[in-house]
Each structure stands twice: as structure tokens, then as C-alpha cells.
Image: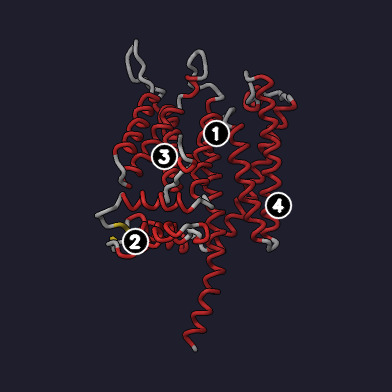
Amino acid sequence: MFGSQTTKVQWRPEAGRLVTLMAVAFGLTVVITRLYLMASGYPKIGGGTYHIAHALFGGLLLVIACLLLLLSSGRTSMIWAAMLAGVGLGLFIDEVGKFITANNNYFFPLAAPIIYLAFLLVVAVARYTARRRGQSPELVLAAVIAEIGQSIGDEITTARRDLLRGELADIDPARCGPQQRELAKALTTYLDEVPCDTETPVTHRVAAFGRRLEQRLLPLPVLRAGLITVMITHAAWSLLRLVLAAVVIAGWHSHWRELDHLLDITSGHGWKALVGLGIAAVGQIVVVAGFGAGAVVWLRGREELGVRLGIWSDVVSLTVVNVLASYFSQFLTVFTALAEALLLWLLIRYRIRRARAVTEPEQAQPKKAAASS
């Protein structure tokens, strides 16, 4: 009934950015909501009979986001839909504890890992869409046509025009038929001649200012020393958490009731909690070894290996250890995850800046040679 082409997904050229925006809105909404409720004493909207849960507002925002996508094709509506969808999803899933328990327990320990896993899933989708490769020429052309159609009759920014031209330039002519090649050529010609907004977008000006500020406040030698220090500190912190987990699993007790109460993080959760804590301990071993080895090899000059070990150790901590740790302490895990996400971003930024610092002098040498000749 339907052709095979209709079953394929047509990714938008900016799909990765839109889903990333949704993921950021999702994560911030959950954190802000939980902190606000804790600080305000968990107030209720309604009276003695009614209780209007904030999950309802989340569902309303999700409906509004869907309506924006269905009723409008403009780029602005896409951005608003991504933000509203993230906020709506965050408000909705924040009350997952009420949905999976018979007594509507908002504080059910399993709720935090579910929320954390949902956030990781959205982030994984964002990264996948941002790094998609190998799409067929038909899908690329369809996506570019849809994007151009949203701006017919209007000026587009030079950055967006360059993005669309890059999508067309990545099409392999060998995989195209003559009609598709002609269409790609016509679209490229249109983008070359379409009026563009000569003023730099605010987001690009902010990004450029951020890069200049980053280079001034965090030059590569300073960033390198800071990252190595943080990796060593993280390894020590993870080792401490590993020791505490081993103490709890071993069932050790002290003579001080306050210390026992502090260590007994599995109180009331039974053997399943001990199993989860054991799996988290295995993850902690990987994190300790990864960060420790990464810092050592980095100090010994094997920079690329050290950065890679730091990145993967951070990913293990974010995706394995924190998921299980959130079962026992959701708020501590939130701040730990935020710190580790910042560390991951800084490690990736260092690798990008380091590669750029190496390639720019190499690219400048042929230009100097041509100028001198």
C-alpha cells in the first residue's frame, strides 16, 4: 500500500540542536521543580478535595508543543515546541513515583532512577540525531526542501544558509540519479542567491564572546592542569564512595548510632538495594581506575589517551553509577551529575581546542608559503 520510501525518517538538518534544547529544558525543569518543592515544603494546588498535580501542566505543555508542530512550519515554532516539550516532559515525569505506586508515593526511591534514565535517553537521541551519517540523497533533499520552504520570501541567516549548503554538499553524486543531481544543483543555486541577513545572530555573537572569554580565562595550559587535578580528585572521591559502599554491603556496624544511620543508606530497601549498590560499586571501580589511569598517562605526555580515558570514565559514572546512586540519594546525585556533565563538556572542549591549535598552524604554513612566492 505504501512505498518503501515512506517508511524512512527525514531528519531535519537542525534536528540535533532541537532535541538538545529539549533535553536541556527537560533536565533543568526536573531539577528546579524538585528543589522548589523541597524549599517550599511541597505545597499543593487545590483544596481539601482536589489536588492539581504539576504533571497536568506538563501534559498541557506537551499538547501545546504538538499543536505548534502541527499548525506551523516556521523555525521559531520549532524552537518553542522543543522548549515546551522539554518543560512539559520534565513536569510530567517528575511525578512518576505517583504513577507506579498504589499509594501515590511521590518519594518512591525508584522514581529518581526512572527520571534519570529518561533524561539519558533524550540526551542519547539528541547526540544520535546530531551525528547522523549515511542518509540517502532522497532524505537529505527532502529535509533541505522542507527547511527552505519555511523561509520562502524571507531572509535567512548566513549561518543557516551555510548549514543547508553543507547538507547539499555532503550528498554523494554517485548515489544520485540525474534528476536528484539537478535538484541539488538548483537548491544550491537558490541558496547562493537568496537574500541573507547580514547581521550576525545574537546566539552567534554570544557564542563568539564565550569563546574569547574561554581563551582568556582558560588557556589550554591552565585548562589542562585543572582537568588533571579534577580527574585525580574525582578518582579519590569515587574511591571514598567505593569504600563506603563496601562497608554497607559487608554489614559493618559501629558503636555510634549516628554513624550507623549515616551509613545505612539501604535501610528499608532490602536485598534488591544491596544488589543495586553492588553493581554501582563495580561501576565505581571502573571510574576510579579510569580517572586515575587517565590522569597518570596524561601527566606522562600521552594526552589523547588521558583525555579519552577521562571522557569514558565520566560517561560510565553518568550513565551507570549515578542511575543506581539516585535510588538512594536523588539530590546528591543531581549535583554530582551536574558536576560530571560540566567535566565531560570541559574534556570535550579541551580536545576540540587542542586539535584546532594543532591544525591552524599547519593550515597557515601553506598560505605563508604562497604569499612569499
Residue at position x 51%, y 33% from top? 118
Is disc 1 surrounded by few (<14), some (14 to 19) or many (20+) residues within 10 Å?
A: some
Residue at position x 65%, y 22% from top? 257
Rendered location of residue 82, percent (x, y): 38, 40
Residue designated by label 3: 25
Question: Depth check: 363 or 309 in front?
Answer: 363
Rendered position, 148 above or below 301: above
- Residue 304 appears left or right of 64: right
Amino acid under disc 2: Leu
Rendered location of residue 41, percent (x, y): 41, 23
* Distance between the alpha carbons at the discs numbered 3 and 2: 32 Å
Of circles 1 and 2, the one toward us is 2
- Tag shown at residue 80: none
Residue designated by label 1: 117
Quadrant assignment, res 73: top left
- Residue 11 appears left or right of 52: right
Q: Earlier in the sequence, mark 3 or mark 2?
A: 3
Rendered location of residue 211, percent (x, y): 44, 60
* Distance between the alpha carbons at the discs numbered 1 and 2: 41 Å
* Distance between the alpha carbons at the discs numbered 4 and 3: 35 Å
* Distance between the alpha carbons at the discs numbered 2 and 4: 50 Å
Mark 4 residue element:
helix
* Distance between the alpha carbons at the discs numbered 4 and 1: 28 Å
Residue designated by label 2: 191
Q: Earlier in the sequence, mark 4 or mark 3?
A: 3
Quadrant assignment, res 26: top left
Q: Earlier in the sequence, mark 2 or mark 4?
A: 2
Residue designated by label 4: 293
Amino acid under disc 1: Leu
Residue at position x 66%, y 49% from top? 291
Amino acid under disc 3: Ala
Rendered position, 75 above or below 26: below
